[in-house]
Image (cartoon, coloured by chain):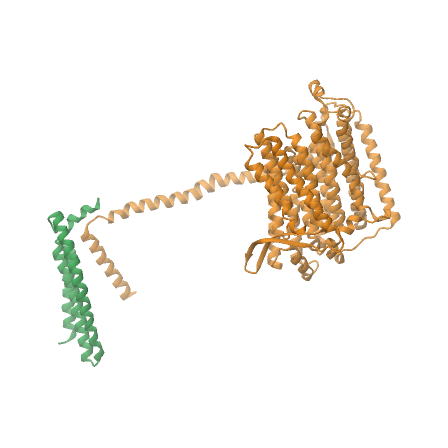
Amino acid sequence: MIHLVWLVPFLPLLGFLINGLGRRYLSKPLTGIVGSGSVVAAFVISLLIFFEVRTPGFTPQVVTLFDFISVGSLHIPFAFQVDQLSALFLLIITGVGSLIHIYSTSYMHDESNEGFARYFAYLNLFVFSMLILVLGANYVMMFIGWEGVGLCSYLLIGFWFKNIEYNKAANKAFIMNRIGDLGFLLGIFLLITQFGSVTFSEVFEKVPSVGADSGVLFAIAMLLFIGAMGKSAQIPLYTWLPDAMAGPTPVSALIHAATMVTAGIYMVARSNVIYSLAPHIQTIVTLVGLATALLAASIALKQNDIKKVLAYSTVSQLGYMFIALGVGAYTAAVFHVMTHAFFKALLFLGSGSVIHAMGGEQDIRKMGGLKKWMPITNFTFLIGCLAIAGIPGLSGFFSKDEILAHAFGYSPVIYGLALIGALMTAFYMFRLYYITFTGKFRGTHEQEHHLHESPGAITFPLIVLAILSVIGGYVGMPAVFGVPNLLAEYLSPIFAPSAPFLHAHHLSHSLEWGLMGLSTGLVIVMILWARSKFANYTDNGEPSTGIAKVLENKWYVDELYDAIIVKPLMVLSRFFQDVVERSGIDAVVNGVGSAVKWGGGRARLLQNGQVGFYIFAMVIGMIVLFVISLFL
Amino acid sequence: MPVQYYIFLSIALFCIGIMGVLMRRNAIIIFMCIELMLNAVNLLLVAFSKMWVDAGRVDAASAQLFVFFVMVVAAAEVSVGLAIIVMMYRNTHSVDINILSRLKN
């Protein structure tokens, strides 16, 4: 089965081609079947590959399709690497991807035929790029997928391209990602000069010989991390992700929550040997993750757009994953990627269901009491909230607890701050839940009349994801429960090479139980607090003041960037346009042109047609040459 | 006779040729002046050859072969050049080269 791995990305590519080229001719059901079918088929193949990878004694396999770049001693094959990590990501991408494709067939049904096909074409192209990203056996392949997902993200954020604001959001996402991509690209160049290869197996074999803590590794790890910062929306490059919510909601669920934004986590986890040997960079990763987790969580406390809350929550959860990577808990990071993919996709799709029922309304102050009309959405959304808040028994609890436990082993201060972030998470998620689903309906009568539960194509993915959000955590139970941690065992071959360079922190069982009890207790307190505050929420319309106002305005970070980067850049551009371009470059170019024209006008007078003059000129020329050769 | 005599004669012939080419407008005269220049060069070649042979360099006599080459080329050139002049005369009823300047437009 492994040798057929190329089929996994190939099928969505085929779907993209069919939908993209035939968008004028295909009917909606046909488009939906091609779009979803290709991803579901890829999921089935991924499942077969996964079971093969899971068999004991499996060694990572590289399937080379052709030689991509061959220059001098540098060879970059177009090859897929099938191992535990990529197989797991294949499952997440195609599994969640399939559900979201199915969901989209209903959610996007109001689009025109052509728009519908365009949407599915982009979505398939995205899945293809993402699969290339995780399957690539070298950094260049990863970069191809990396750019591909960036492009699809841009196309899908600006899917409704007639809205200028959405286009601006798309540009912002693309440009922010480009900043990160530059870092990634420089990192790849440095890898090539240092190791003469970009293939994972070769690079990771040579890395330890450079020696821990060396400057080169420091630079490589930092540059790669800058790439991860852009793609995974970390400080200072996180502001594009909340704006990316301009895209259709299933896109937010798939690209900006479950898969693409975790590419940075995947890249760092894949390069774990490099990071383990660069402990200073690991500290930076931890601190950036922590700062992002806290900042985004605090902003989410005061947002009123249902998707913005979830977007900041995503940024915050990505911060947790980077904390885990930074403290060397790679398994915990990948575990959180997986559980987060389940519950965040669930929450986004649930919010999509709500927005659909509300006729496009996204402001939670105008919702309320939706529980009565939308029982399935309500129930699944509640499960998603419980999972992300970290209620014991649901998936989010296990993954977040593992991260917190490792953070405690690394430094109790980081643990404390991360715990505060986790409590904020519980608070804002239940604020969102209570304002949206309980209390009295605050929208218009027309909207109230229109409220309904969403159709089956929308509720089915919700139910599946809700089940996964509940049971997804049991693959990675912590050791204190006395059951094997299946995920850690499964992933151990991937992270084994970096184990000798990490300092393992073993917490005693009683301490671990204590931490677990503490966080659970505080989370429940937070939920009850949110309930008492927002269960019967009424919008009093007063503008918020003080810290609340700062949070509502996202700490004014967008304004800050605008003032210190965008505006000076604009002024500089204008200067270049008006002064350097007009009186510098244009003047030189036009001057050369008119000088040649003037000179030509003079020189053509020499061609007077008099043969005698030509001969005379020839003789003069000969005399000049003679004089030169004689005297000079 | 000293070789200088030949050199001065040769320079005189060559300058007459150049002046004729530059000054005259009749194509046939110009043509003859070109021949004059060629022959000035031929004369010089023969003179130098003789000078070296007299000085004991017997192999220098082969330089006179060049004169025959020049004559052959000049003969070929004459046939082409005269043909051009004949055609020119047929078209313009004149051998004045300034007439050719109407090619300018």
Q: Colour of chain B?
A: green
Q: Is residue A328 visible?
A: no
Q: Residue A106, position in %: x, y?
A: 66, 30
View extreme (left): residue: B93
Horizontally, residue A502 falls left or right of residue B29, namely right
View extreme (bottom): residue: B56
Picture quadrant where residue A256 is located: top right
Picture quadrant where residue A380 is located: top right
Q: Is residue A231 visible?
A: yes
Q: Residue at x 54, y 38 (%)?
A: A571
Q: Nearer the viewer, residue A47 or A431?
A: A47
Horizontally, residue B85 falls left or right of residue A376, namely left
Q: Residue B13, position in %: x, y?
A: 14, 65
Q: Is residue A98 above or below residue A200?
A: above
Instruction: Count numbered badges in the picture.
Output: 0
Q: Is residue A128 above or below residue B22?
A: above
Horizontally, residue A327 falls left or right of residue A567, namely right
Q: Residue at x 65, y 49 (%)?
A: A5
Q: Quadrant of the C terminus of chain A?
A: bottom left
Q: Colour of chain A?
A: orange
Q: Residue A438, position in %: x, y?
A: 78, 26
View extreme (right): residue: A510
Horizontally, residue A29 falls left or right of residue A618, namely right
Q: Residue B58, position in %: x, y?
A: 21, 80
Q: Nearer the viewer, residue B11 or A186?
A: A186
Q: Residue at x 64, y 41 (%)?
A: A127
Picture quadrant where residue A300 is located: top right
